Image (cartoon, rainbow, N blue to C red):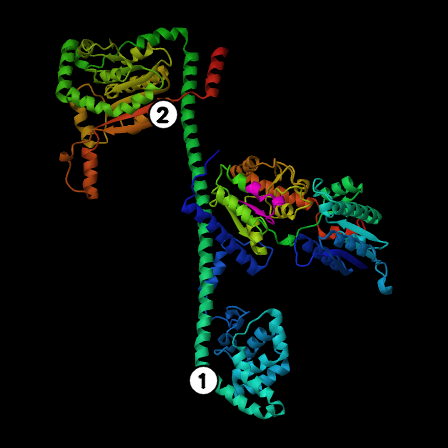
């Protein structure tokens, strides 16, 4: 069938969203559907640009443009889910975070307040009208329920290149690949290194705005022999770092989904995460497939020491995580079936 | 607040080496592009490539381009390659595609007349080339000079057709002049690339071998540790077995000891006189006096003996952990008693020689004139830290020696030490000659037999200590195997001690023995 996949495009800002959109469109094609990818340009500021983007999306009737009937519409991002189609499935990657979970009540002016109201109304209307509403994760579904009173079903998808992950013997380091941002809390891991009793090394991969700050932190605590920022890594290097790690750290603040949890599980490694990390908590079972600690340096250090002291057990936990991933049925095949309402067919 | 210790260079090296090792693993992943984990000994593949002949297989010339975004003239010229290879390379680098059939044919025809520089200049003058270069951001630093003649001729307008033959000749001549230099440059470049690749391979192989060595090392040391633990466990089992057996033997003896048999065993314990059979001819007192004199004449001075006894100091320390009651059987002139007293023991000597007993008592020691077995039997169970006997075992018939060890084991506390010193018949001269100086000696005892005797009675950690070899001056000079053997047999240690420690009975054996007693 003809499927219109709609998303947004923020020029030259590539991240996990890109891989996600590519993944959905490839999976739909592989299942024999004709896919047209519609990407609406999006700007985060000024407020007027967001008002315009919402109005533009709402104005697009995609039932049969130019007389060509489209069977299904699937939308992934705000405000692309504003398009009109009688068989519209929305799979919410995340909402416009500035108006929801990142809303700062003490930093409000007339314009931001007006925008917030408009965005809430927009979501209320278009997400409410969708024939089927899915969320990228339990966490995103919870937010839709809290803020918009909408019921969305969590639908998980595999990380990019899931089939290429493999496992190998542990070389006594903790791996944390992520963009270097405050919300990802690499500083928690760096501070944890000060309290380690074991000789475990900390390998932090990725680029980002906080690189300089994190580097200064490492130098201030004289942790250069233990902690290193290795910057951007190639796909192959990422696979190798995962494969040889003792455990993977993923302790961001209130993450939506987080591929890192799943990638660690695919590489059969236990995951150290935090009570307030959001997405990872849907997959990590404490003491079974990893450790869920307080977001506090000593607690994280203790989890790392535990992983090192009981290496055989850590390896078992990794394998258990790998099994849990496969039991959860996370696959593109499943995603396509759910999005098109074909499950059980 | 913990202060971080300044990191050492080695630790920095560790994290760097970790990064290198991962990069090496990743390079293999990129090459294989498979979902498979690298197999063990993966470095052998790299080793194979390293050892393969450098000329095996015609590598693509594109491989030797240092930077495809800034190719040099020498790299595009392919002076050491055929015309087809040259055209393929030029098309790839300048147009980012394979040559089309017609282009290939036309240039192959022109090459003999016009040379490679002309073909390159012609290709660079095409619009498609310039677009492709721009799009890919490729920089050709040498194109301005190379295409200048063609660009000039184009300015002539309709006349440019007439200039072509001259242009071709000019380019041809330039090609011929530059060719040797470009050839050298091309070869140099190929060598550089090969050597770079080799460096990479060598580095990968070394890193991998290092990893493989570490793995093997860890494996082997884990295996060794496992084996030695197993051995130790077996050793312990062994000792525990003998000790348990001793306990059961005692229990059985107690059970079968009928009241009637008691007096009989009492009677047996009358001190057997270990004097010569001809004691009737020689009164005991006169013999004792003779023996004291004999001792003085043959056993060396008290100082010498004391020096020798100091060898056993570590045993005294071990025994002291469980108490201070010590019994010395056949205490003789009391050198050992003196040493015991100095080390905080309360020694109790036993001897059958009245003159010796007298001698010791004068020195203020607690010495009993009694038979060793009788003295042992008067002691309660588990009461002593040390039972010793210097040069007494070889005076006793075996049944007495056996009973002596058995009783000593009974009166020792767990952890207590048993020590018996006797002449060492491993030294042939001792066994055949000096042993018989003493008229009261019976037969020499061997280290093997004594070790078994103590082990059998449930002593643990039973071992032999050898002392008093002949002085160096007595030895045959030389260090060949024969001399060593002669010196070993004839001049080796003249005395040995068998030492054992009473093993704390296994809880189960103890319980079962107690249970049996209750049952009786």
Q: Position of residue B100 (x, y in %)?
A: 63, 79
Residue depicted at x 49% and y 36%: A197
Q: Residue furthest front?
A: A110
Tag 2 near tag 1, CB within 8 Å: no
Chain letter behind tag 1: B
In this view, B454 is above or below A153:
above
In this view, B513 is above or below B267:
below
Q: Quadrant of residue B69?
A: bottom right
Q: Nearer the viewer, residue A61 or B244?
A: A61
Q: Which mark is residue B19?
A: none
Chain letter behind tag 2: B
First to last magenta residue range:
A171-189
- Label 1: element kind: helix
Residue on which disc 1 sits: B177
- Label 2: element kind: helix
Left or right, B93 with respect to A330, comes to left
Q: Position of residue A221 (x, y in %)?
A: 49, 41
Residue depicted at x 53% and y 58%: B27
Q: Nearer the viewer, residue B16 or B50?
A: B16
Q: Position of residue B26 (x, y in %)?
A: 54, 55
In this view, B138 is above or below A208:
below
Q: Is residue A263 visible?
A: yes
In this view, A107 is above or below A14:
above
Taking the magenta stretch, the answer to whether it contains residue A184 is: yes
Residue depicted at x 79% and y 47%: A118
Residue depicted at x 57% and y 56%: A234
Q: Which mark is residue B455?
A: 2
Q: Nearer the viewer, residue B193 or B159?
A: B159
Q: Position of residue A23 (x, y in %)?
A: 70, 55
Give the crowd class for mark 2: few <14, some 14-19, many >=20 residues within 10 Å: many
Give the crowd class for mark 1: few <14, some 14-19, many >=20 residues within 10 Å: few
């Amino acid at each position: 069938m003809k499927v219109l996949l709609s998303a947004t495009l923020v020029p030259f800002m590539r991240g996990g969203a890109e891989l996600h959109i590519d993944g959905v469109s490839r999976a739909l094609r592989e299942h024999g559907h004709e896919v047209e990818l519609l990407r609406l340009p999006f700007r985060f500021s000024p407020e007027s640009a967001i008002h315009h983007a919402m109005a533009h999306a709402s104005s697009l009737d995609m039932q049969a443009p130019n007389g060509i009937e489209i069977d299904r519409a699937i939308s992934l991002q705000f405000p692309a889910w504003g398009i009109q189609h009688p068989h519209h499935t929305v799979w919410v990657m995340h909402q416009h975070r500035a108006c929801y979970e990142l809303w700062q009540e003490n930093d409000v002016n007339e314009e931001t307040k007006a925008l917030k109201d408009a965005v809430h109304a927009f979501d209320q209307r278009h997400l409410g009208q969708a024939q089927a509403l899915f969320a990228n994760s339990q966490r995103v579904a919870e937010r839709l329920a809290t803020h918009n009173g909408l019921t969305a079903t969590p639908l998980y998808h595999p990380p990019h290149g899931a089939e290429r992950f493999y496992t190998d013997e542990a070389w006594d380091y903790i791996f944390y690949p992520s963009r270097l941002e405050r919300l990802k809390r690499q500083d928690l891991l760096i501070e944890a290194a000060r309290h380690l009793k074991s000789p475990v090394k900390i390998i932090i991969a990725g680029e980002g705005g906080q690189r300089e700050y994190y580097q200064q932190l490492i130098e201030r605590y004289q942790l250069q022999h233990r902690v290193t920022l290795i910057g951007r890594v190639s796909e192959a290097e990422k696979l190798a770092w995962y494969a040889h790690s003792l455990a993977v750290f993923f302790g961001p603040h209130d993450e939506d989904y987080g591929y890192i949890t799943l990638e660690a599980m695919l590489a059969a490694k236990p995951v150290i995460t935090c009570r307030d990390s959001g997405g990872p908590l849907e997959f990590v079972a404490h003491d079974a497939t990893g450790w869920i600690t307080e977001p506090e340096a000593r607690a994280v250090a203790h989890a790392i020491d535990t992983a090192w002291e009981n290496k055989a057990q850590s390896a078992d936990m990794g394998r258990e995580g790998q099994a849990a991933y496969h039991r959860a049925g996370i696959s593109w095949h499943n995603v396509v079936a759910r999005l098109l309402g074909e499950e059980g067919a | 607040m913990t202060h971080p210790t300044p990191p050492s260079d080695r630790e920095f090296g560790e994290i760097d080496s970790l990064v290198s090792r991962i990069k090496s693993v990743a390079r293999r992943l990129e090459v294989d592009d498979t979902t498979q984990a690298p197999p063990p000994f993966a470095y052998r593949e790299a080793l194979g490539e390293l050892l393969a002949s450098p000329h095996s297989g015609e590598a693509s010339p594109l491989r030797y381009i240092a930077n495809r975004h800034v190719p040099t003239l020498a790299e595009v010229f392919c002076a050491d390659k055929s015309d087809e290879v040259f055209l393929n390379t030029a098309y790839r680098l300048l147009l980012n595609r394979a040559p089309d059939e017609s282009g290939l044919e036309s240039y192959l025809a022109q090459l003999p007349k016009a040379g490679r520089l002309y073909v390159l200049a012609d290709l660079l003058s095409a619009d498609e080339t310039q677009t492709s270069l721009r799009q890919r951001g490729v920089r050709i630093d040498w194109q301005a000079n190379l295409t200048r003649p063609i660009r000039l001729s184009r300015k002539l307008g309709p006349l440019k057709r007439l200039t072509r033959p001259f242009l071709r000749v000019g380019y041809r001549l330039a090609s011929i002049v530059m060719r040797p230099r470009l050839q050298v440059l091309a070869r140099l470049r190929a060598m550089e690339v090969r050597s770079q690749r080799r460096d990479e391979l060598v580095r990968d192989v070394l890193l991998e071998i290092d990893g493989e060595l570490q793995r093997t090392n860890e494996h082997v040391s884990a295996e060794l540790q496992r084996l030695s633990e197993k051995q130790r466990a077996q050793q312990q089992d062994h000792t525990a077995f003998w000790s348990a057996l001793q306990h059961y033997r005692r229990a059985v003896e107690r059970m079968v000891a009928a009241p009637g048999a008691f007096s009989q065993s009492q009677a047996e314990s009358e001190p057997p006189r270990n004097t010569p059979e001809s004691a009737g001819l020689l009164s005991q007192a006169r013999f004792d006096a003779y023996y004291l004199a004999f001792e003085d004449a043959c056993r060396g001075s008290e100082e010498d003996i004391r020096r020798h006894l100091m060898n056993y100091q570590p045993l005294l320390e071990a025994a002291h952990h469980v108490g201070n009651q010590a019994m010395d059987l056949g205490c003789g002139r009391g050198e050992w008693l003196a040493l015991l007293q100095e080390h905080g023991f309360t020694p109790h000597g036993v001897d059958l020689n009245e003159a010796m007993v007298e001698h010791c008592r004068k020195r203020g020691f607690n010495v009993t004139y009694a038979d060793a077995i009788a003295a042992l039997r008067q002691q309660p169970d588990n009461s002593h830290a040390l039972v010793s006997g210097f040069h007494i075992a070889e005076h006793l018939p075996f049944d007495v020696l056996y009973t002596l060890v058995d009783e000593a084991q009974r009166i020792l506390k767990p952890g207590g030490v048993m020590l018996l010193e006797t002449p060492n018949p491993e030294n042939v001269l001792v066994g055949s000659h000096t042993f018989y100086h003493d008229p009261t000696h019976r037969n020499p005892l061997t280290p093997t037999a004594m070790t078994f005797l103590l082990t059998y009675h449930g002593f643990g950690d039973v071992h032999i200590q050898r002392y008093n070899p002949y002085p160096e001056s007595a030895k045959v000079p030389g260090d060949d195997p024969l001399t060593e053997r002669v010196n070993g047999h004839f001049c080796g240690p003249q005395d040995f001690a068998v030492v054992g420690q009473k093993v704390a009975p296994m809880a189960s054996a103890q319980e079962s023995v107690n249970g049996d007693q209750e049952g009786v």
